Image (tube, rainbow, N blue to C red):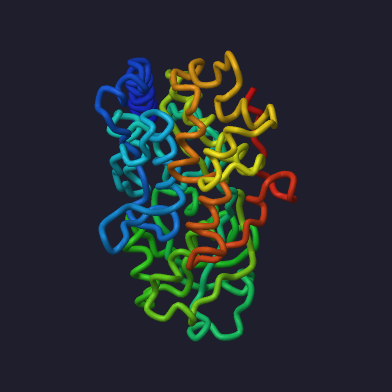
Amino acid sequence: MKKILIGLLAAAAVGSAVSAASAGTLDDVKKKGFLQCGVNTGLPGFAAPNDKGEWTGFDVDYCRAVAAAVFGDGTKVKFTPLSAKDRFTALQSGEIDVLIRNTTWTISRDTALGFNFTGINYFDGQGFMINAKKLPGVNSALQLSGASVCVQSGTTTELNLADYFKANKMEYNPVVFEKLEETNSAYDSGRCDVLTTDQSGLYATRLTLAAPDDHVVLPEIISKEPLGPAVRQGDDQWFDIVKWVHFALLNAEELGITQANVEEMKKSDNPEVKRVLGEEADTKIGTDLGLTNDWVVRIVKAVGNYGEIFERNVGQGSPLKIARGINAQWSKGGLQYAPPIR
């Protein structure tokens, strides 16, 4: 009976999500006059308020990019900070228009929860961080048998952690918290030996600890964590808009279109550049989406291209200093590859 009830509740949630999406998210967003974007409650480099209370980060810039595509103004966005547990309900219920919160694309989220992931804007993987002074001599996750591990509930991290230790015939003691802040605080105060989450999150968290230099991110990556924006099923137009915002950011970087030169590039003789920027005669690259034909120009003016977003927030120009690695363009040995705008 319990399984039947759970199934009915899940079906109802998906049904309500489809109903909310079918109303036309783009029209709803325009009517409100702003985009409601679900983000992390506070993850440096990805989504966190600065000392002025302004939201900044990689995911935040993606929210601003969608707002710029719709309104021509990247500031027309309101941010809803969400815990890992609450993020899916917020999207299903229509509380937010899009979820851009370092969320892993999985089959259950893509099907049972009634979501569509619009692309992979950050290729990540789960890792481990330790206090080197507390665990001297540990330089591999395979040396963590018997350790206590701080982990956030309601995430793929919990399952990956259990799978990894079981596969390697190791014991561990999970110390579980609902909120990210509680998880990180417990680790920093010494309530557990190890902190596990996506490796990007570990680098971000290390910056917030009392003694960052005491902590080491171990080399093992134990999972695939393809992160990206998610929207409700049932609204193909909105799905296309959010999806092509991501592809536009990648195409702009590949073509050398930056925040500083985008106006000058509109005069380019390169037909592909002209087409992407909406300067080609009789172009419909924007109107077919329900946007203006200069939507890519709007995005790049607001936040720059993908490479600029990455470097500013998490790359070498940021405190995190994460290497592009597999998030480099396909032409430079990475996995980021966008379909052409034509």
Which quadrant of the figure has residue 274? top right
Residue 104 in picture, x, y percent from top left:
51, 44
Residue 120 in picture, x, y percent from top left:
57, 40
Residue at 58% in and 54% down: 125
Residue 42 in picture, x, y percent from top left:
35, 57
Residue 37 in picture, x, y percent from top left:
34, 39
Is 334 placed left or right of 45 in the picture? right
The foreground one among 33 and 79 is 33
Residue at 39% in and 30% down: 3
Looking at the rendering, in which quadrant would you find the N terminus? top left
Looking at the rendering, in which quadrant would you find the C terminus? top right
Which quadrant of the figure has residue 174? bottom left
Is 209 placed left or right of 76 in the picture? right
Total numbered badges shown on the rendered structure: 0
Residue at 66% in and 28% down: 340
Image height check: is 25 above or below 316?
above
Residue at the farthest top position? 282
Image height check: is 197 above or below 309?
below
Image height check: is 333 above or below 33?
below
Residue at 62% in and 25% down: 275
The foreground one among 77 and 91 is 77
The foreground one among 72 and 54 is 72
